[in-house]
Image (cartoon, helix red, strand yellow):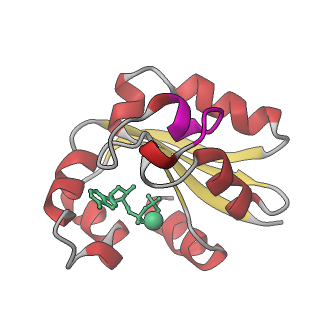
Amino acid sequence: MEQTFVMVKPDGVRKQLIGDIVSRFERRGYTLRDAKVMTIPRDLAEEHYGEHRDKPFFGDLVQFITSGQVFAMVWEGENVVENARTMMGPTNPKEAAPGSIRGDYATDVGENIIHGSDSPESAEREIALFF
Ligand code: DAT
Ligand code: MG
């Protein structure tokens, strides 16, 4: 069965959104296989976001994702990688529809509440990194 890596980012934890986000995935019928609260060390943040290493926002991204506790999860179910991305909404919350997680709670592309793997290959890589 397909699995994906989902993480409530420090802004989502600060806004007390862990329960809401877990509930959305449960109501959708997905199964939580693993989860933990953690503070991401700098080297893990740089590895996780390695594809963005050369982007101008990389420094701010690593600073932000290590700025507080996150809630890391493994969710399982049919087509969960793609459906989780749909539930999250687009990267830039300004483009995210109401009803999506980013559309409901985020305003800033740099602080957009939630991470979800963008492909089954990314999911496998990220689950191995975090769990
Ligand atoms: P996603 O998180 O939707 O997979 P991504 O992988 O392209 O998006 O980027 C990773 C994170 O980097 C994203 O959640 C927020 C940040 N980011 C992306 N594009 C950005 C930009 N143009 N300015 C600032 N931060 C950005
Ligand atoms: Mg991404």
Residue at the image point whose x is 21% and y is 40% from the top:
67
Residue nearer the viewer, 117 or 131: 117
Q: In the rendered structure, does residue 98 fall within the stretch colored magenta? A: yes
Q: Quadrant of the N terminus?
A: bottom right
Rendered location of residue 81, percent (x, y): 68, 63
Q: In the rendered structure, does residue 28 fall within the stretch colored magenta? A: no
Q: Quadrant of residue 62?
A: bottom left
Residue at the image point whose x is 44% and y is 44% from the top:
93
Residue at the image point whose x is 61% and y is 25% from the top:
20
Rendered location of residue 27, percent (x, y): 81, 32
Relative to 43, 21 lies left or right: right
Q: Quadrant of residue 96?
A: top right
Residue nearer the viewer, 94 or 25: 94
Q: Is residue 110 above or below residue 42?
A: above
Relative to 122, 109 lies left or right: left
Rendered location of residue 116, percent (x, y): 54, 56
* Residue 114 visible in the picture: no
Residue at the image point whose x is 36% and y is 67% from the top:
48
Q: How many marks?
A: 0
User: What is the magenta range?
Assistant: 97-104
